[in-house]
Image: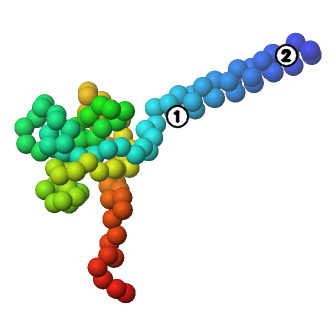
Amino acid sequence: MKNIFLTVSLFVCIAMNAQDSSVSEQAKHKPKTQIVEASCGQCQFGMKDKKGCDLAVRIDGKSYFVEGTKLDSHGDAHAADGFCSTIRKAEVVGEIKDNKFIASSFKLLPVEGHDDHKGHKH
C-alpha cells in the first residue's frame, strides 16, 4: 500500500512539474508589449539597407525595419510630427525575425507636450 501511494505521489509531482514547464515555455515565446522609438529608418535612423522611406523601430539601441504596418498608415510622414521629420514613441507587440521587427500590433503614441486643444476654446 505504501509503495502504491509513493508511486502515485511521484507520478502526480512529475505531471505537475511537466505542466509548469510547458506554461513557462509558452510564456517565453509570447511577444510582450513594449514602448519603442519609431521613425523613418532612412531619414532618422540612418539605415541604408533599403532606398526610400520605410517604417523602422529602435529597440535597445538597434534599428529594425517593420513588417506588419507601413509608414503612411500612421499619418503624413513629412509633416512636422511625421516619421521622416522626428522620432516618435510607439507601443508595439511583435518579434524580431531575420533582422526585421514583425509587428502584430503597432500603436503610435501622442507627441509629448502636444495639446490638441491649444488655440481654441470649448
Query: Which residue is painted at 36% across and 40% down in the image?
Result: 94
Q: Is residue 32 placed above or below 73 in the rendered structure? A: above
Residue found at the far left of this picture: 51
The residue beneath circle 1 is 27
Mark 2: which secondary structure?
Answer: helix
* Classed neighbour count for the residue bearing mark 2: other residues with Cα under 10 Å, few (<14), some (14–19), many (≥20): few
Mark 1: which secondary structure?
Answer: helix
Residue 65 in the image: x percent, y percent? Answer: 22, 37
Query: Which residue is painted at 46% across and 32% down in the image?
Result: 29
* Classed neighbour count for the residue bearing mark 1: other residues with Cα under 10 Å, few (<14), some (14–19), many (≥20): few
Name the quadrant containing residue 52.
top left
Badge 2 amino acid: Leu
Question: For this view, does 80 lie left or right of residue 37?
Answer: left
The residue beneath circle 2 is 6
The one of 23 and 57 positioned closer to us in this rendering: 57
Residue 15 in the image: x percent, y percent? Answer: 69, 24
Residue found at the far right of this picture: 1
Q: Is residue 97 placed above or below 92 in the rendered structure? A: above
Query: Which residue is painted at 16% across and 55% down in the image?
Result: 77
The one of 10 and 1 positioned closer to us in this rendering: 10
Q: Earlier in the sequence, mark 1 or mark 2?
A: 2
Residue found at the far bottom of this picture: 122
Please tell me whether mark 1 or mark 2 is closer to you in this view.
1
Whole-angstrom CA distance, mark 1 to mark 2, is: 32 Å
Residue 43 in the image: x percent, y percent? Answer: 14, 43
Quadrant occupied by the C terminus? bottom left
Name the quadrant containing residue 17.
top right
